[in-house]
Amino acid sequence: MLSQLPQGFLWGNSVSSMQTEGAWNEGGKGKSVYDIREASEHASDWKVATDSYHRYKEDFDYMKELGMNCYRFQISWSRVFPNGDGEVNEEGLAFYDRFIDDLLERGIEPMICLYHFDMPLHLAEEYRGFLSRYVVDAFVRYGKLIVDRYKDKVKYWITFNEQNIFAMSHGFQIGGLLEGDGTEKELYQLQHNTLIAHAEIANYLHKSAPNCEIGGMVAYNKVYPATSKPEDSLAAQLVDDFTNQFHLDIFTNGKYPAFILAYLKENNLMPEFEEGDEETLAEMKSDWLSFSYYASSVISADKITKDTPIYQYREIGGQPNPNLEATEWGWQIDPIGFRSILRDMYNRYKLPVFPIENGIGVIEELPENELIQDDYRINYHRDHLQAMKDAMFLDGVDCIGYLGWGLIDILSSQGDMRKRYGVVYVNRENHDLKDMRRIPKKSFDWFKKVIESNGKYLD
């Protein structure tokens, strides 16, 4: 299929602040929960990352050369509010002023994410993160400040990266709980609190910046039943409902779906609603729905019992898919699953869809000639872009863009520099910063040609 994508289609790159910026103690920044994490055998600390605080212009130049017209990045909450809730750090805001202006000068549309798991340390220590409504209020104050500052320069917004992860076992950690896990009831309170925070910001943005757009984001993992047994099919459906559709439904319809309410009431897990919460959710609108997608998974009901909480189904019942290849990290490569998600989301919710993370992480070493022959990355993106085009041209999906994840190498979500997603190599390792040079890989030239043709040619 040689169909060209619509004019204005967004091609770009997504990152978080803690995986890129570094400068953990510069520019007035306060500590986040990542700044106290220590290095381990296969993980760096987070103090330098890929040093984009000092080197972002070079990265922007590579993006411009690629033809990218969109960059989704995160504002670091603790760079703007060092304690998360006190005085504003004007030096931090001045950094993002320059950062956004330098993107716009290169013809790259900024897309702001307000939270990517790096809770200000003070709020984690004093309030247990988003389990506290005080922290929700602090986040809303921070978010409104950022909206007011950049609404005339930034059109595209998300509040939380992969917000449905708050519905999974590691939701406590990304929500700011420093030690251990809370109860299942607290997990649903955490989800509720972050949904209210998202709705507050979305409502404020639509009122104060009518030319801006915002959507909710989920980490979408396509789940297949292990067999044709009805029990496996039901388990897969429940996982999809509770980890994907729960949030997408609220982002679209502004209220808890019936299947969630029934489960919460039956199991005495209803979160505490404060006065006005239902009205806040009901007012919320999404301009599109965004998601990350890397792999699909399979679930068997054999080990799942009546006492197993649904949020633990994948941990207990997950198993490899014998029909798919996997990366060295065990992530199973499934471009057809990508098409399926696009068509299902669009048909169910009738909103434009926006995949804002996609890519393959691989251990790579720089050869003597300094050209990494990453045909596996070209194949991965080609197959997923073709699946996206099939969804658009064969299934009628309204898809507004495609953002790869970490297309200039960054630390992985676990701090592991070995897991590289980029089309540009960053010359550092977990425990050796080397010279931090940026070196294009073979996939760089391929991606450049794809974007030049606006997706028409993928070979």
Image: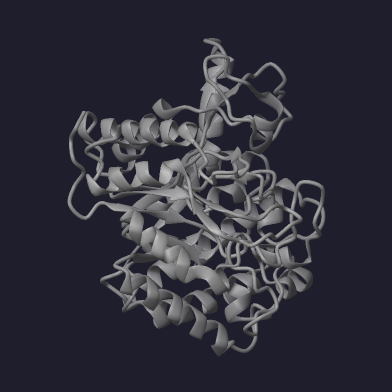
x 73%, y 67%: residue = 35
Residue 126 vs 73, above or below: the answer is below
Counting from the top left corner in percent of width and height, residue 147 is at 42, 76
> Residue reaching furthest front?
369
- Name the side, left or right, on which 26 lies relative to 226: right
x 34%, y 31%: residue = 387
Q: Quadrant of the C terminus?
A: top left
Q: Nearer the viewer, residue 258 or 446?
A: 446
Residue 255 shows in the view: no
x 51%, y 53%: residue = 439
Q: Quadrant of the N terminus?
A: top left
Number of marks in the image?
A: 0
Q: Nearer the viewer, residue 381 or 396?
A: 381
Residue 184 shows in the view: yes
Q: Nearer the viewer, residue 229 or 367?
A: 367
Counting from the top left corner in percent of width and height, residue 143 is at 49, 74
Residue 306 vs 418, above or below: the answer is above
Counting from the top left corner in percent of width and height, residue 68 is at 33, 56
- Name the side, left or right, on which 453 lies relative to 247: left
> Residue reaching furthest top?
228
Looking at the picture, the colour scheme in use is: one colour
Counting from the top left corner in percent of width and height, residue 397 is at 25, 38
